[in-house]
Amino acid sequence: MDLEVDNYYHLYNRSNSRELLFKNQDNYLYFLRKFRNRFDGLLKVFAYCLMPTHFHFLIRVETQKTDVLKEQIGIQLSSYTKAINNAFDRNGSLFQQHTKAKLVTGNSQLVNLITYIHQNPVRAGVVDKLTAWPYSSYLDLAGYRAGSLVDRTHIEQIFGSKEEFIAFSERTTFSSSFIE
């Protein structure tokens, strides 16, 4: 995985064999809390969505020490796996071996990726509307929740208002091949 300071990346991974990564609400919240603590000062989060079998983050690298950041990504997944293994009497790896970090180039791709990430639960049929999924940053960026993990700066600069962000998010759709 190549990472460079000040660049934006779509960071994602999925479970092995479509096993549930997050078995209950506490698992989702634990993963996000660990993510926030582990990456403070190393990256900024602009969007995220945790799905039952995978996750997506739109991040910007904030550190010159990208080797440390890559190591911390591995530690995040490994420590989460250990916690799940202990809690649910399981063993073995939970995540696929390689976390992907795809470079995001340009504001158009950035905006589209934010929407793509947030639409995951609707596209998967888990919920019928964006506001119904509590494990994404959509509620924060749209002003329905006051979460502090995501940086709202770009949304405000690009869209000008929460209403414009909501309208774009609801009218734009992407297939799962968008990230391929």
Image (tube, rainbow, N blue to C red):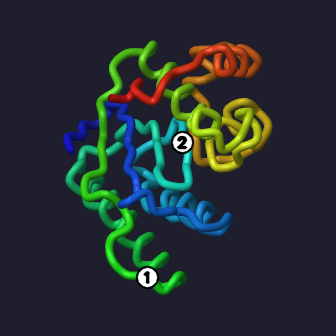
Could you tell me which residue is drawn at 38 percent across and 42 percent down?
Answer: 11
Q: Residue at x 29, y 53 (%)?
A: 69
Q: Is residue 119 left or right of residue 174?
A: right
In the rendered image, which quarter is residue 165 located in? top right
Please tell me how crowded label 2 is: few (under 14), some (14-19), or many (20+) other residues with Cα within 10 Å.
many
The residue sitting at 30% across, 40% down in the picture is: 101
Q: CA distance from mark 1 to mark 2?
A: 27 Å
Q: Amino acid at mark 1?
A: Arg
- Residue positioned most to the right: 144
The label on residue 48 is 2
Q: Earlier in the sequence, mark 1 or mark 2?
A: 2
- Using residue 161 as the reference point, say whether residue 83 is left or right of it: left
Identify the element where label 1 is drawn.
loop
For label 1, the crowd category at 10 Å Cα-Cα, with few meaning under 14, some 14 to 19 and many 20 or more, is few
Q: Is residue 161 left or right of residue 30?
A: right
Task: Give coordinates of residue 62: x percent, y percent.
Answer: 36, 41
Closest to the observer: 68 or 50? Answer: 50
Relative depth, front residue between 31 and 88: 88
The one nearer the camera, 36 or 132, is 132
31 lies above or below 114: below
- In the image, which disc is placed on residue 90? 1
